[in-house]
Image (cartoon, rainbow, N blue to C red):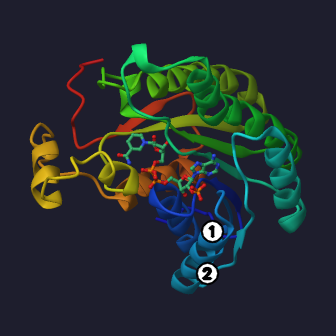
């Protein structure tokens, strides 16, 4: 299937590793011109180089902290200037800390708000005129399976991701007339550094991952490229009639019927 992504310009945020890197690699492999952003400049440049080497397509690295409004503005301006258009925006960020509700103060809530909710509003607002100009666009947000079923200690993540679900629904409503689709992708357990950091420090990693996968119908933790495959499809021409949805990539882990 030709996804018709050749020469489309895609911004992929939080992309030096993990899910963002897998998504950037997949879009680049389909022929898109990809602009990646995250904070560590050296790490980001290395990732851009690695992806370009694999796919043979140009990948631009622009450092950005997505929780900083000025940096986001500068990033989007530079990205738009580079190729003269923006077709795809992949919103992603590091996840907020896990802990019980009673352990988070105002500062922790404010940081999570800026990192995981306000960042999505800021980037989407800034790319909108570019997508309106070209007459089409794709906005895809990486959130979490915690919007579908309770995940212990994830109150910051769940609260902000639920905000993204609502925001995406309204954006899908308002941006539809411009032929811009807006969707969320909700990972279950996907093997990235973030997941590895949640394993008990004294446990054998292999055993600990097996333990975590025990209740997943497919019997294993997911791979970043399996989530990237869905994002790449949602970014494609073929997904033109899918908007306002939240799709899980979790090996069947969420047992909710609705
Ligand atoms: N993996 C899973 O199983 C899973 C499940 C549910 C939800 N999620 C969510 O999916 C998202 C990605 O997770 P992941 O597993 O790919 O994490 P990861 O492997 O830890 O990678 C995180 C990426 O985000 C970048 N980043 C962090 N803070 C940033 C900031 N303020 N501005 C710009 N970039 C930033 C990091 O680079 P720098 O540090 O250099 O900025 C890195 O490239 C997170 O929000 C996570 O909560 C993941």
Residue 243 image point, x, y percent? 57, 32
In screen coordinates, is 207 left or right of 245?
Answer: left
- Between disc 2 and disc 1, the foreground one is 1
17 on left or right of 210: right
Q: Is residue 154 above or below residue 90?
A: above
In the displayed structure, 63 sits above or below 76; it is below
Q: Position of residue 70 (x, y in %)?
A: 85, 43
The kind of secondary structure element at disc 2 is helix
Residue at the spot x=65%, y=68% of the render? Answer: 32
Q: Which SS class for mark 1?
A: helix
Q: Would residue 169 be found to the left or right of residue 245 on screen?
A: right
The residue that label 1 is drawn on is 44
Checking the image for residue 170, the label placed there is none
Seen in the picture, residue 239 relative to 106 is either above or below; the reply is: below
Cβ of mark 1 under 8 A from ligand 1: yes
Q: Position of residue 250 (x, y in %)?
A: 29, 41
Q: Is residue 131 visible?
A: no
Measured in 3D between alpha carbons, the distance from the residue under mark 2 to the one under mark 1, in whole angstroms, is 9 Å
Marks 2,1: beta carbons within 8 A: no
Report the side of 251 relative to 246 (left or right).
left
At x 64% / y 24%, what residue is drawn?
110
Question: Which residue is at 35% across, 23% downward?
Answer: 148
Residue beneath disc 2: 49
Check disc 2: other Cα within 10 Å, few if <14, some if 14-19, many if 20+.
Answer: some
């Amino acid at each position: 299937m030709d996804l018709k992504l050749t020469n489309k310009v895609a911004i992929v945020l939080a992309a030096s590793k993990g899910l963002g890197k897998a998504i950037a690699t997949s879009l680049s492999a389909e022929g898109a011109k990809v602009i990646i952003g995250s904070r560590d400049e050296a790490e980001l440049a290395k990732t851009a180089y690695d992806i370009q080497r694999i796919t043979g397509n140009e990948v631009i690295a622009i450092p950005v902290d997505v929780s900083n409004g000025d940096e986001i503005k500068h990033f989007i301006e530079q990205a738009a200037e580079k190729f003269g258009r923006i077709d795809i925006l992949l919103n992603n960020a590091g996840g907020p800390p896990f802990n019980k509700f009673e352990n988070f103060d105002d500062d922790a809530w404010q940081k999570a708000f800026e990192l995981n909710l306000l960042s999505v509003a800021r980037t989407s607002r800034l790319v909108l005129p570019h997508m309106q100009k070209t007459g089409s666009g794709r906005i895809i947000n990486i959130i979490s399976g915690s919007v579908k079923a309770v995940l212990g200690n994830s109150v910051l993540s769940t609260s902000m991701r639920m905000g993204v679900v609502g925001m995406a629904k309204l954006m899908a409503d308002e941006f539809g007339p411009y032929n811009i689709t807006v969707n969320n992708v909700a990972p279950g357990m996907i093997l990235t550094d973030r997941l590895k950091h949640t394993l008990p420090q004294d446990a054998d990693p292999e055993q600990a991952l097996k333990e975590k996968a025990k209740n997943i119908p497919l019997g294993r933790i997911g791979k970043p490229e399996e989530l990237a495959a869905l994002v790449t499809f949602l970014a494609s021409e073929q997904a033109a009639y899918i908007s306002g949805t939240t799709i899980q990539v979790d090996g069947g882990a969420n047992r909710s019927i609705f």
